Image (cartoon, rainbow, N blue to C red):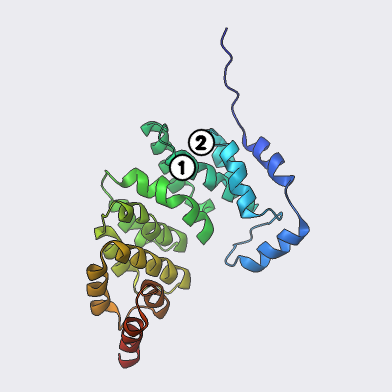
């Protein structure tokens, strides 16, 4: 009689994760992370969190959700990393990809910091939507929830890698009036990435919006320009 694979569980992951905790790393994480919304930290380096997630890549969505439910930031980061690794894996079925996408959106209340969004939105959301309608991203871009807005733009990194840039520029326009610095940074990051694929299109965007867009977004978007070009666009804001 063939052996039945043993399901990896959230409880097993948490037990393993706690073994790597340290008070020194906890202090480092508390200094590093902002906008944590009451998160708890046990002091595990993110590299170790992601390494452990590789061992738990077969965790089913219902167990991943238990990780997302945790008040401990490193546990939720582990859940997000497991989702990301499953979404990246070629053998992952379309049904599982949809389950991960649905879980991400349904429990976005627990994906509530910039690092959690950045860990898994690109493949879990962007990868899933690549060959599908993308109206949900525009709904997220207009959300009152800052992390949903960050998801809307960071997810487009998957499209950019395929040289599909339309949504990045359109969503960036929506987010230009955002009041949150972490949205400005994400928008500038994606604009810079899009510019790697199509510099003239980024230049056209900056000619239209450079004088009025948030300074942080502008600075991030022009990081790969030469000094003369950077000075030109930063000067537009001073003259506006």
SS at mark 1 in the image:
helix
Report x, y in % for residue 193: 35, 63
Residue 223: quadrant of the picture: bottom left
Q: Which mark is residue 12?
A: none
Q: Which residue is rendered at x = 56% and y = 44% of the image?
A: 79
Image quarter where the N terminus lies is top right
Q: Residue furthest bottom?
A: 239
Mark 2 = which residue? 61
Relative to residue 36, is residue 160 drawn left or right?
A: left
Report x, y in % for residue 159: 31, 53
Q: Which residue is rendered at x = 40% and y = 35% of the image?
A: 90
Q: Earlier in the sequence, mark 1 or mark 2?
A: 2
Relative to residue 47, is residue 89 drawn left or right?
A: left
Q: Is residue 171 visible?
A: no
Report x, y in % for residue 220: 41, 73
Relative to residue 24, is residue 81 drawn left or right?
A: left
Count residues near mark 1 (Cα–Cα under 10 Å), then give few for <14, some for 14-19, many for 20+.
some
Q: Residue furthest top?
A: 1
Up the image or down, 60 lies above or below 203; here it is above
Report x, y in % for residue 213: 34, 78
SS at mark 2 in the image:
helix
For the residues labelled 1 and 2, say whether their Cβ atoms are less than 8 Å apart.
yes
Mark 1 = which residue? 103
Q: Which residue is rendered at x = 35% and y = 43% of the image?
A: 128
Count residues near mark 2 (Cα–Cα under 10 Å), then give few for <14, some for 14-19, many for 20+.
some
């Amino acid at each position: 009689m063939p052996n039945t694979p043993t399901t990896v569980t959230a409880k097993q992951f948490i037990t393993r994760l706690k073994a790597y905790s340290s008070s020194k790393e906890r202090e480092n994480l508390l200094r590093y992370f902002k906008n944590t919304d009451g998160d708890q930290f046990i002091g595990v380096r993110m590299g170790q969190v992601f390494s452990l997630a590789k061992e738990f890549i077969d965790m089913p969505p219902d167990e991943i959700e238990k990780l997302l439910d945790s008040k401990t930031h490193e546990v939720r980061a582990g859940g997000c990393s497991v989702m990301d690794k499953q979404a990246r894996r070629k053998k992952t079925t379309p049904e599982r990809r949809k389950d991960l996408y649905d879980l991400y959106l349904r429990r976005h209340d627990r994906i509530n910091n910039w690092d959690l969004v950045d860990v898994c939105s690109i493949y879990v959301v962007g990868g899933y939507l690549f060959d599908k309608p993308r109206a949900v991203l525009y709904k997220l871009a207009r959300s009152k929830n800052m992390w949903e807005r960050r998801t809307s733009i960071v997810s487009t990194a998957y499209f950019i890698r395929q040289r599909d840039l339309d949504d990045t520029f359109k969503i960036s326009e929506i987010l230009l009036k955002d009041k949150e610095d972490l949205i400005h940074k994400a928008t500038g990051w994606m604009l810079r990435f899009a510019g790697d694929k199509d510099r003239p299109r980024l230049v056209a965007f900056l000619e239209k919006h450079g004088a009025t867009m948030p300074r942080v977004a502008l600075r991030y978007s022009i990081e790969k320009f030469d000094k003369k070009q950077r000075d030109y666009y930063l000067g537009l804001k001073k003259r506006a």
